[in-house]
Amino acid sequence: MVDRIEGLGPLSQSGKTQKKSENNFSEALKEALEKVNDIQKKAEKAADDFAQGRISNIHEVIIEAEKASIALRLTVEVRNRIVEAYRDIMRMQI
């Protein structure tokens, strides 16, 4: 005789699980974009401070600008990969 499998809920809950994972992905993406935006703002502020004479160390400004550049390039690459994956999924035949 086959034993009953415990822990499986009704099928209607599968939609809730999918919705929760969508929220997690969208929240993670939103947080990542906010971090990149903060890095960009920090680099811009460092450049403004240097131009106004509040910062005398050009190295700090260059480091902040490079951090912002790297973060932006990474963000664009991730976006490109997501778009490419979406296009691959849309091309799939059912």
Image (tube, helix red, strand yellow):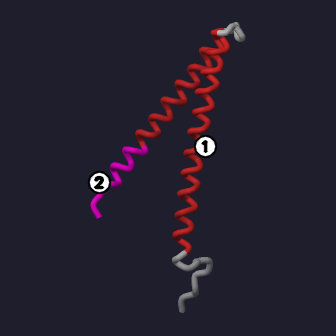
The quarter of the image holding the C terminus is bottom left
Q: Identify the amino acid type marked 2.
A: Arg
Whole-percent x, y for residue 21 in the image:
55, 59
Of mark 1 and mark 2, the one earlier in the sequence is 1
**Is 86 part of what is drawn in magenta?**
yes
Residue at 51% across, 30% down: 72
Q: Identify the amino acid type marked 1.
A: Glu
The quarter of the image holding the N terminus is bottom right
Residue extending farthest to the right is 54
Q: Which mark is residue 31?
A: 1
Residue at 64% across, 20% down: 45
- Above or below, comparing residue 73 to residue 34 in the picture: above
Tell me the CA gap for discs 1 and 2.
30 Å
Tag 1 secondary structure: helix
Q: Quadrant of residue 34?
A: top right
- Above or below, comparing residue 60 to residue 33 in the picture: above
Horizontal side, residue 76 vs residue 32: left or right: left
Residue extending farthest to the front is 52
| Crowding at mark 2 (Cα within 10 Å: few <14, some 14-19, many 20+) | few
Whole-percent x, y for residue 91 in the image:
29, 54
Query: In the image, which residues are magenta?
Result: 82-94
Which of labels 1 and 2 is toward the front?
A: 1
Residue at 52% across, 69% down: 15
Residue receiving disc 2: 91
- Above or below, comparing residue 85 to residue 75 in the picture: below
Whole-percent x, y for residue 8 in the image:
58, 77
**Is 91 part of what is drawn in magenta?**
yes
Whole-percent x, y for residue 64 in the image:
62, 20
